[in-house]
Image (cartoon, rainbow, N blue to C red):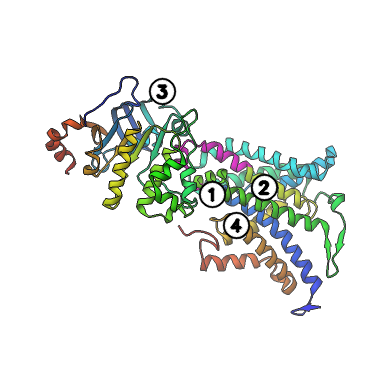
Amino acid sequence: MEIFGRPLPAMLSQLLLGLVNGSFYAILSLGLAVIFGLLNVINFAHGALFMLGAVLAWMGMEYLGVNYWLMLLLSPLIVGALGILIERVFLRHIYKLDHLYGLLLTLGITLVIEGVLRSFYGVSGLPYSPPDALAGATNLGFMVLPNYRAWVVVASLAVCFATWYVIERTKLGAYLRAGTENPRLVEAFGVNVPLMVTLTYGFGVALAAFAGVLAAPVIQVSPLMGQHLIIVVFAVVVIGGMGSIMGSILTGLGLGVIEGFTKVFYPEASSTVVFVIMAIVLVVRPAGLFGKEK
Amino acid sequence: MAATPVAGTPALSIRDLHAWYGESHVLHGVELEVQKGEVVTLLGRNGAGRTSTLRAILGLTGERKGSIRLSGVETIHLATHRIAHLGVGYCPEERGIFASLSCEENLMLPPAIQGGDGGMSIDEIYAMFPNLKERRHSQGTRLSGGEQQMLAVARILRTGANLLLLDEISEGLAPVIVHALARMIRTLKAKGYTVVMVEQNFRFAAPLADRFYVMEHGRIVEHFAAGELEARMPVLNQLLGV
């Protein structure tokens, strides 16, 4: 069977690949959007912390024999704690300054984290295999579904929607939304906004580390793996706009899929298609597809 | 209505308060005292420092110096979120209704004061402001101006705050809403709330307040009880141009 002259299994496997990449885009852009909303910081370190999540998973296995599942929990906790430290020590001092300072500061933190890991592990890539329970593939009849990739999509979506639910439907989320609009007033109501800011940054980077562990068996683990991804993720954020949590999730997944199909139909454009879309969106809707005009 | 100072510690006592926004020195030694259960109005022209005084009480200005005591507790060095828990409810001039929250989420947002008596129940609030119940699922900023103002006041009644700082609540509203707000202030006073109002609308404030402070250039320049209002009108006319 063929669609537009391409075999169906090829289409479906690219769709799945697109969804896997889209899942990473979604989790990372979600974290960036939440952090930007409350801290007003464009967190350039997001890619490095995603990478750190993956490298920690590898280190856990390599040095301590800690398995994938435990690291899927521990790695985000460790990176979240590191995020809390970064916020307390560095970011706290630059909230009142222009966005540019936050960008530069987090870029500096990125270079430090990547540089340190590079000096230990080089850039050639560290092997990490999927957990035994998810090894292999399932034949669905019309396509062969690699179990681990299916798990990545399911786990990412679950985390994204849980985050959406907490932010849009709970009291805690109401503090976060209100704090994003007018932090001083929320503080005047007696909410400990500085603490909320710290925890939000910790949570946002913990999401990145979670995505990093998910990515470890499918993307080559290396100190530079975050760089490749984060540029695309920033484009995703620009396309989706900063205003909406659901917007970040849908844009991330959607662009992953578009990228996947571009690989089938016109592979030469697959690495640039996201940026072409970004350029078009910037012209037509500068605030992004789901963003609110200010 | 005469001034009825209650014996004991004042709800709010401000001594030699200076405040800055960045480099700009906006309050120059404000002296002000409000007894529990009183309704006090700050009068003055725009830019006289009335809003800054309310904001300074909550630590929302830049640097502050001097003394601000809430029921005897010094707050000049406290973080903003701690000051609220001493029982202060703040309704800002711009109302501060959150667009990303529904009417009810806006209403439920301010946390209850720690160790407070709980404040009004949601049923009491909805009985006082039936519109808010009707529109509770609407987006906060889709409410009419009057409804938003009621919401901005209602949400600080829920927390158990006893000292209410109300900034220009009658501003830009239809007369029927202004009447409803005046009724509300009387109800709150009867319930024992302490109210500090900043008002441009002299006719709204005059019959409600127990005492008046007049500000100019970041200082208190006049101070009198409601009973002296008649006698002070010539001075007021000159100071406010009412």
Disc 2 is attached to a residue of which chain?
A
How far apart marks 4 and 1 lie (CA) works out to 14 Å
Relative placement, left or right, of A174 versus B38 is: right
Mark number displayed over residue A207: 2
Sequence-first disc among 1 and 2: 1
In magenta, the rendered stretch is A180-202
Q: Are marks 3 and 1 in contact (CB under 8 Å)?
A: no
In the image, what residue occupies the spot 62% across and 54% down? Answer: A29
Alpha-carbon span between mark 2 and mark 4: 15 Å
Q: Which subunit holds the residue at mark 1?
A: A
Which residue has dot 3 on it? B73
Residue neighbourhood size for the residue with mark 1, other residues' Cα within 10 Å, grouped as few (<14), some (14–19), many (≥20): many
Cα–Cα span, label 4 and label 3: 45 Å
The amino acid pointed to by label 2 is Leu
Tell me what residue is drawn at x 60 percent, y 57 percent. Answer: A246
Residue A3, placed above or below residue B140: below
The amino acid beneath tag 4 is Met
- x and y, in percent, of residue B111 in the image: 49, 37
